[in-house]
Image: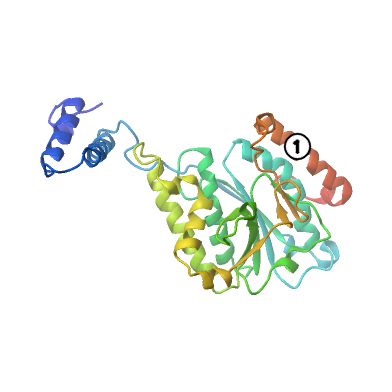
Amino acid sequence: MSYQDGGGEPPRTRLARRASAALRCLPATTSSRTRLALVLLVIGSALRNLRIFHATRPSSGQLVWSWLYYSDLDRRVRGDGAAKKMLVAQSSGLGDSYATYIEATGVVNRAYAKRHGYDYVILQGLALGGYRNWHSTFNKPEVLHAALESPKGYDGVLILDADALLVDFDVDIASLLDDRYALTAQRVARHPHAWNLNIGVALWNLKHHRTRWISDRWREESSKALGLLWNPFVTWWPWHWGDQYLLQWILRYEMTEAERNATLNTVDTIFSSRNGTVVNHFTRNGKDYNDNTDEAREKKLKEVSDEICKKFEPACGTVKVSF
């Protein structure tokens, strides 16, 4: 480690000097809690400059977009098609457990997309930055942005978590796209407030006048959060809970109740954890630790995927499994 920027002063001495100088600037009446908070901020800044921790936001690394344009297929191949242009999307990190989940759920979701003549995309990597695989949870704002910007002119996009899959091929998701709302999603545990949504299964109306504003704000706040995640002194900040919390914050505090009621379509049964009529979302089971291991969830997803493929045979056998 180089100490050149400190005139050869050892790091420990420099930290103590900076903290002491900051405390001397405070009034005598300052509370001990405020003094402690200031010391932590000074130490955090110093550690960054000393490169004890990452001094710049780590690179997002490799980013892979995999598109399947089933909408380009001949109607005689893809069926009757639909009046609306739809996109089905999933995302994960690269080489993590969620990428493995997509290997199971992607077969079904791609088969569904092809049957209805909808495009399908997987985004893998860290689209907005970060340095750990779980930071790929912030890929969803980027997927929504890409759908809005696509020259395909999509009417809607269904963004699914890696552990979510479409279970009924006879239901057309375009029929669930209500023109009155920007977003259709499951309300968290029948929570009374519309903003408290589970964003793991989200049907976005890309033609709604509020969708782009929500997308821009969500993407902006996600980028800000990822810019702070690496700092060891701010990991307790609430927006580090993930992309869902950030979206809920925007919906709750930057929109009026009237705007929320005209924007959000909350559902309880069609998108649900493990028993949805249209989409099953295999979230972690808080009551059973053994059911929460990566191996157990992957096994369950493969079992359900096989059941759906058998039910709607030969749909799964006619899709391109690898990109």
The one nearer the camera, 287 or 1, is: 287
Residue closest to the eye, 142 or 151: 142
Asked if residue 34 can be seen in this view, the reply is yes
User: In front here: 289 or 200?
Assistant: 289
**Residue 141 as seen in the image, left or right of residue 113:** left
Position of residue 25 relative to residue 178, above or below, is above
Residue located at (25% from left, 33% from top): 50
Q: Residue 223 location, x and y as percent?
A: 43, 52
Is residue 313 something one can see in this rendering? no
Q: Residue at x 60, y 73 (%)?
A: 207
**Residue drawn at 38 percent across, 45 percent down:** 228
**Mark 1, residue position:** 300
Q: Mark 1: which amino acid?
A: Lys
- How far from the left and from the top, in percent, is residue 248? 51, 57
Q: Nearer the viewer, residue 57 or 249?
A: 249
Q: Quadrant of residue 266?
A: bottom right
Looking at the image, is 254 positioned above or below residue 101?
below
Residue 300 picture location, percent across and down:
75, 37
Image quarter of the N terminus? top left
Q: Is residue 162 above or below residue 52?
A: below
In the displayed structure image, the side of residue 66 where residue 317 appears, left or right: right
Give the quarter of the image for residue 263.
bottom right
Q: Quadrant of residue 202?
A: bottom right
Secondary structure found at label 1: helix
Q: Residue at x 48, y 68 (%)?
A: 255
